[in-house]
């Protein structure tokens, strides 16, 4: 990538972006932070079983609880297990802390992207998108697997823009452990960029560019494959593919229309 800004970024800018991000998070989650009974809606479905780590008598093994545990990626489980076993934190409470941390990472990464492109002013505009657009915080709320998508994707782009192959490698591994489909997206784009760089006169891509990067891609691929295989091995079947979507009536709201996820209400799309 070319045309990057060489304007210096003051440390105070990073600190102010961090402070503003935490204020926005605290205001948006004030009810949840004030009451242990207020949690993200999907947390009830995806994280409830983690209370077993604090009290083994809670949520004994059954089909639904074990299924909820099976589709949470290993990296997310490791974070919550570390918080519960190492610090005695209730998973529902930790989900709120993790939400704030991920929102902070997203805002800082967006600031870094803007500042790298055109200087601190664009960085502030980029960070303000995270503060002013409810989608970002809504998607991160709950500290679920999906919450890692935006922050890690922004970090991957930032490392790519700064031509940091090491940074791209580390972020890709984190994606594979926490949000596998984003890892597939990032790995595919990076490999395509590297291929195009070889076929044209463009500078060599930062990733994959070294033998160790091949190991990173293999490890990320193994993590994604392993999660899908584990679901099947535990009796829940593999991830749904195109054929499954076409045949499964549960994926239709209006079966006779013959379109995936067809809704009977008017739509602009």
Image (cartoon, helix red, strand yellow):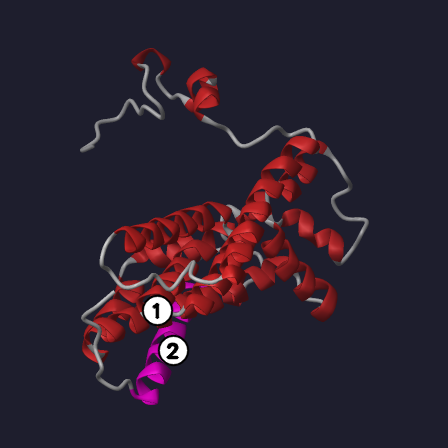
The answer to whether 90 appears left or right of 168 in the picture is: right
Q: Which disc number belongs to residue 201?
A: none
Question: Is residue 112 in sight in this rendering?
Answer: yes
The residue nearer to you, when weighing 98 against 214, is 214
Tell me which residue sits at (55%, 50%) in the image.
218
Tell me which residue sits at (46%, 45%) in the image.
181
Question: Callout 1: helix, strand or loop?
Answer: loop
CA neighbours of label 1 inside 10 A, class few (<14), some (14 to 19), many (20+): some
Q: Position of residue 227 (x, y in %)?
A: 60, 42
Where the C terminus falls, by quadrant?
top left
Tell me which residue sits at (33%, 71%) in the image.
162
- Residue corresponding to mark 1: 163
Q: Main secondary structure of the magenta part?
A: helix
- Residue corresponding to mark 2: 18
Q: Position of residue 183 (x, y in %)?
A: 46, 50
The residue nearer to you, when weighing 38 against 144, is 144
């Amino acid at each position: 990538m070319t045309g990057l800004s060489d304007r210096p970024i003051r440390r105070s800018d990073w600190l102010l972006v961090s402070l503003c991000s935490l204020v926005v998070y605290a205001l948006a989650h004030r009810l949840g932070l004030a009451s242990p009974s207020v949690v993200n809606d999907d947390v009830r479905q995806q994280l409830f079983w983690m209370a077993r780590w604090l009290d083994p008598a809670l949520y004994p093994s059954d089909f639904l609880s074990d299924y909820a545990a099976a589709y949470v990626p290993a990296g997310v489980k490791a974070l919550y297990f570390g918080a519960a076993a190492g610090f005695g934190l209730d998973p529902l409470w930790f989900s709120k802390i993790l939400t704030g941390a991920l929102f902070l990472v997203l805002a800082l990464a967006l600031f870094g992207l803007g500042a790298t492109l055109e200087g601190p002013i664009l960085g502030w505009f980029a960070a303000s998108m995270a503060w002013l657009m409810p989608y970002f915080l809504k998607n991160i709320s709950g500290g679920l697997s999906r919450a890692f998508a935006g922050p890690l994707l922004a970090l991957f782009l930032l490392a790519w823009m700064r031509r940091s192959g090491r940074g791209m490698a580390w972020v890709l591994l984190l994606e594979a452990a926490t949000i596998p489909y984003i890892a597939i997206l990032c790995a595919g784009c990076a490999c395509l960029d590297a291929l195009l760089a070889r076929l044209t006169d463009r500078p060599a891509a930062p990733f994959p560019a070294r033998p160790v990067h091949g190991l990173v891609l293999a490890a990320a691929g193994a993590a994604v494959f392993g999660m899908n295989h584990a679901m099947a091995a535990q009796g829940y079947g593999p991830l749904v593919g195109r054929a499954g979507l076409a045949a499964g009536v549960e994926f239709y709201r209006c079966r006779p229309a013959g379109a995936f996820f067809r809704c009977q209400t008017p739509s602009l799309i």
